[in-house]
Image (cartoon, grey):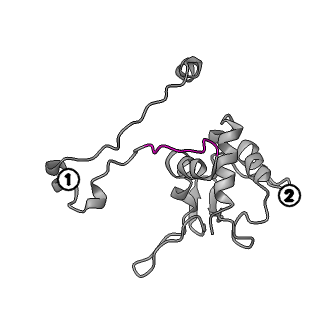
Amino acid sequence: MAIIAYLSSLPPVENEVSRRTLGTLTRNTTGILDSWKEVRGYVPSLNQRFGVEYGKYLLENVARCQSCHNTPGTLMTEGEYLMGGSTMRHERGEKRVPGISSSPEEGLGAWAEEDIVRYLQTGGTPENNYSDASFCPVGFYRNSDPKDLMAIAKYLKTVR
């Protein structure tokens, strides 16, 4: 926490960071496809600080929601992005992972953006049910900047 407090006290720095790539030797040991040339973890320049694009970046690279909420694929089918369906097992039992797309039937389509932010902060649904923190890491989001959570909510409302 002290590191976060210290970094938060510093003035922001605006600079362009070039995209990192792997050299020929390294790429030949990890894969030769051009798509593998880029180093994972590159932070893109985002024009709208708290917009949909920023929300997508946070969801996929910081919160990593797809790790649990993607529908698992099989040998013959691809998984589905943020549609849920896998079973999460924990010492307290097991639970079907819900979809978090904007689908009204299978996701968060009926939730307002503010409902999504409230859920991420408290674990409470619009119906005042609360998730089990051992299955959903709401504690991870509890102290997040509300603007960051709103960016995630805005992005989730665009996912079909």
Query: Residue 15 placed where, x, y %?
Result: 44, 31
| Residue pictured at 56% horizontal, 46% vertical | 58
| Residue pictured at 48% horizontal, 43% vertical | 45
Say which quarter of the image contains residue 144.
Answer: top right
Task: Decide if residue 121 is on the left or right side of residue 129.
Answer: left
Q: Is residue 140 above or below residue 100?
A: above
Q: Nearer the viewer, mark 2 or mark 1?
A: 1
Pointer 2 with pointer 1, Cβ within 8 A: no
Q: Which range is magenta?
A: 43-50
Badge number at residue 117? none
| Residue pictured at 70% horizontal, 51% vertical | 132
How crowded is the residue under tag 1: few (<14 C-alpha within 10 Å), some, or many (20+)?
some
> Looking at the rendering, in which quadrant would you find the C terminus?
bottom right
Q: What residue sits right under mark 2 in the picture?
A: 127
Query: Residue 35 placed where, x, y %?
Result: 31, 60
Task: Tell me, yes or no, whether the highlighted magenta stretch contains residue 122.
Answer: no
Q: What residue sits right under mark 1 in the picture?
A: 27
Task: Tell me, yes or no, whether the highlighted magenta stretch contains residue 45.
Answer: yes
Disc 2 marks which amino acid?
Glu
Q: Check the image and name the residue furthest to the right.
A: 127
